[in-house]
Image (spheres, rainbow, N blue to C red):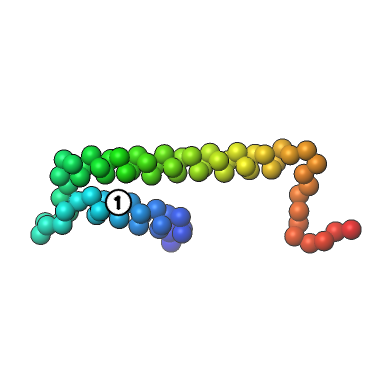
Amino acid sequence: MRGAMESVTRMALEEMIIGHSNESRFGHVLSQEGLRQLVDTLYEFFETSRNLKSAGDRLMGQGAQAPGARATTGRNVR
């Protein structure tokens, strides 16, 4: 079974391809201009994904290295 992230990513990629192609009786066809636009859109998508991952990694690293940070167990301890 696919994870939610994989399903959403696959749907987004499919929408990008369909949005830049023309439907024909043989399937979807890309013009030269459509191909150029699709490559630009996919590049932006991957760049955004990479930037979000880097930002998340930085936040996780800061949380683990913050002075005085304590691990929480989800229950009140006195």
Q: Amino acid at mark 1?
A: Met
- Quarter holding the N terminus? bottom left
Compared with 28, 43 (above or below) is: above
Indicate the quadrant where residue 6 lies.
bottom left
Q: How many marks?
A: 1
Left or right of 16 in this view: 55 = right
What x and y, as percent, mark residue 73? 76, 56
Left or right of 56 in this view: 50 = left
Compared with 32, 11 (above or below) is: below
The residue drawn where x is 30% and y is 55% is 15
Residue underneath mark 1: 16
Indicate the quadrant where residue 43 lies.
top left
Q: Nearer the viewer, residue 26 or 22?
A: 22
Q: Which element is circle 1 on?
A: helix
Q: Residue furthest right?
A: 78
The residue drawn where x is 23% and y is 50% is 20
Q: Residue furthest left?
A: 25
Q: Residues within 10 Å of mark 1 (few under 14, many from 20)?
A: some
What x and y, as percent, mark residue 10? 36, 54
The residue drawn where x is 26% and y is 51% is 17
- Quarter holding the C terminus? bottom right
What x and y, as percent, mark residue 58? 60, 38
Left or right of 71 in this view: 3 = left
The residue drawn where x is 25% and y is 42% is 37
